[in-house]
Image (tube, rainbow, N blue to C red):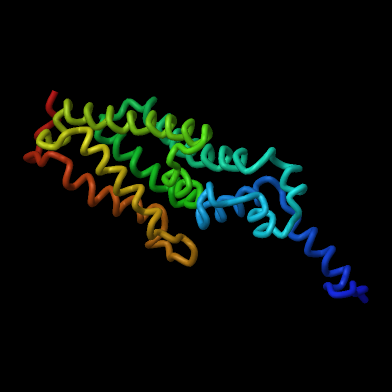
Amino acid sequence: MSTRRAGGPPIARSAARRGRPGYDLESLLAVAVSVFNERGYDGTSMEDLSRALGIAKSSIYHHVDGKEELLSLALDRALDGLFSVADEVTVSSAPAIERLEQLVRGSVRVLADRLAYVTLLLRARGNTATERKALARRREFDQIVADLVKQAERDGDIRPDVDPAITARLLFGMVNSLVEWYRPAGRSAHAGPDALADAVCAVAFDGLRIRRSPGEGSHL
């Protein structure tokens, strides 16, 4: 039987709450990202994180130096996923148009798999050194996209009447907009990440590709 404090919950129950759910860094990070997305990073205090986690602030400091380290870990989680796809595309010998589609497909899957982390990345505004570092990496990724678009246009596989920089922005504007409405929980297989990537690529690349007669090859 638990012992009750005056004016408080039973000691056994209180102790159980302090220990619940035994946070490691991974689970702590997941909750922190959820709070950052809900309240905004600047609007979140360590006290807010402590309440959301149900643990003392000292327990958070056992894992990280503070909330900016949590932000850094979260933004890297999103960016590392995107760059892993970019690395695969970069070493591929496939035509630029195929590598561009591979990059879009892979990015959609990363977004679906790491939705909360990518959402946080897309909301970063450069208010801290950590955010500015993340935005610099994001610009590197954007440049990879733009370079692939330019190469595909030079190859004659993408219509030349749209500026490559605009094409790149439109492509990933569509991908990035998924964070506003895509919710993977409870979705059936036909609405999963692969189906989502198929839909994005169908909409995007059907409008970008140059139509050729049967047997006609790529322009050199």
Name the residue rendered at 24%, 32% in the picture: 149
Q: Quadrant of residue 122?
A: top left
Number of marks in the rendered image: 0
Q: Quadrant of the N terminus?
A: bottom right
Q: Can you say whether 82 is above or below 19 in the image? A: above
Q: Quadrant of residue 90?
A: top left
- In the image, is 192 to the left or to the right of 159? right
Location of residue 78 in the rendering, given as x and y in whole percent from the top left corner: 49, 41
The single residue placed furthest to the top in the displayed view is 220
Name the residue rendered at 61%, 54% in the picture: 31
- In the image, is 11 to the left or to the right of 156? right
Q: Quadrant of residue 216?
A: top left
Location of residue 27 in the rendering, given as x and y in whole percent from the top left corner: 65, 51
Location of residue 55 in the rendering, given as x and y in whole percent from the top left corner: 74, 56
Q: Can you say whether 207 is above or below 38 in the image? A: above
Q: Can you say whether 107 is above or below 91 in the image? A: below
Q: Quadrant of the C terminus?
A: top left
Location of residue 153 in the rendering, given as x and y in whole percent from the top left corner: 17, 30
Name the residue rendered at 42%, 62% in the picture: 189
Along the line of sight, the residue nearer the viewer: 130 or 1: 130
- In the image, is 19 to the left or to the right of 121? right
Along the line of sight, the residue nearer the viewer: 125 or 82: 125
